[in-house]
Amino acid sequence: MTQVAFIGGGNMAASIIGGLVQQGEYSAQQIHVSDPNDSQRQQLSEQFGVHTYADNQQAIEQADVVMLAVKPQVMQQVLAPLFATLSERQPLIISIAAGIDMPSLAQWTGCKAIVRCMPNTPSLVNYGSSGLFASDDTNMHQRNLADSLMRAVGITVWVQQEQEIDTVIAVSGSGPAYYFLMMEAMIETATKMGMSLETATQLTLQTAAGAAEMAKRSDVDPAELRRRVTSPGGTTQQAIATFESAHLRDIVAAAMQAAQQRAAEMSLELGAQSEQ
Ligand SMILES: NC(=O)C1=CN([C@@H]2O[C@H](COP(=O)(O)OP(=O)(O)OC[C@H]3O[C@@H](n4cnc5c(N)ncnc54)[C@H](OP(=O)(O)O)[C@@H]3O)[C@@H](O)[C@H]2O)C=CC1
Ligand SMILES: O=C(O)[C@@H]1CCC=N1
């Protein structure tokens, strides 16, 4: 049975672990999580029944797959004491960190089979979207393993160029936050219009979920679905005109470009190249 270790049990790891355990393809017994934070470990073990460790070394001892889920800024220092074990055991490494490139991961782990994965937090409810990119030395079995792990919590797409991971970050990695911001704004406005917070929240969330589900099932694109909501001379037309005159599309483009650029900058700031 494949043993999966998570180094770092924070927001994103908990989303993937929660999805994996709830989905049932991996049992809690196969999942080992290390995190320095006592309360985080306690919550993971109580909520999902997974093995938890304060010591990263213990978590990776039997692992076939090591999922790196710490902040990019601490990745190098986290991997340094694990190098000997990782390079000797050669588990499949899956890094979910934004902005830590493949050459850095290869250098810091000493491993050959490495997959860079960009998931997102809706993995917790099996609505995850993950972009994946594999090193040349990752064989088909290992690619399938990475794919099946992430498919247990949502959809997967493979990219052919490492750079494309930065675009995945801008679209789906950071994407949930864009929609949450829209929800926040709609709820806030509805309450200012006099609606109760509970009703505003209920209507906003159901509308977001309904629009996404409709767009997924539809045989026409979102632009056509939008047109179908927009009666000539009606209310939606006024709302959409307000968005367009405030250049919403340009704002979205600028935001996504900023996310993509930041990912590329992080690779330069935090990667092994920055030490040379
Ligand atoms: N959040 C998201 O939506 C997404 C995040 N990612 C990537 O996932 C990674 C984790 O992000 P996120 O989950 O948001 O961050 P979190 O801060 O929530 O999680 C990181 C966890 O790692 C722990 N940690 C810190 N130092 C160590 C250590 N030495 N050994 C083991 N664990 C350690 C932290 O503990 P403590 O809090 O005590 O420091 C924390 O619990 C990042 O690299 C990010 O780029 C990718 C896609 C989406
Ligand atoms: O904000 C971040 O850097 C991480 C990566 C994608 C989502 N959260």
Image (cartoon, grey):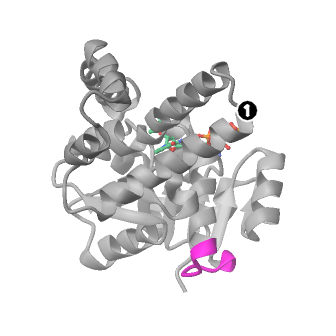
Residue 119 lies in magenta, yes or no?
no
Instruction: Confirm if mark 1 falls within 8 A of ligand 1.
Output: no
Q: 18 above or below 29?
A: above
Question: In the image shown, does 208 or 231 lie closer to the viewer?
Answer: 231
Q: Is residue 25 magenta?
A: yes
Using a 10 Å C-alpha cutoff, classify the residue at mark 1 as few (fewer than 14 neighbours), some (14 to 19) or many (20 or more): few
Q: Which residue is mark 1?
A: 196
Q: Is residue 251 visible?
A: no
Q: Which residues are magenta?
A: 22-29
The structure residue drawn at horizontal position 72% and vertical position 69%, both measured from the top left corner, is: 50
Secondary structure at numbered mark 1: loop
What quarter of the picture does the C terminus occupy?
top left
> In the visual, does 188 lie left or right of 123?
right
Q: Quadrant of ligand 1?
A: top right
**Residue depicted at 65% across the width and 51% down the height:** 9
Can residue 261 be seen in this snapshot?
Answer: yes
Amino acid identity at mark 1: Ser
Residue 232 percent coordinates (x, y): 24, 32
**Would you place residue 166 above or below residue 154 in this image?**
above
Q: Position of residue 68 (x, y in %)?
A: 51, 52
- Quarter-of-image position of residue 264: top left
x 63%, y 73%: residue: 22
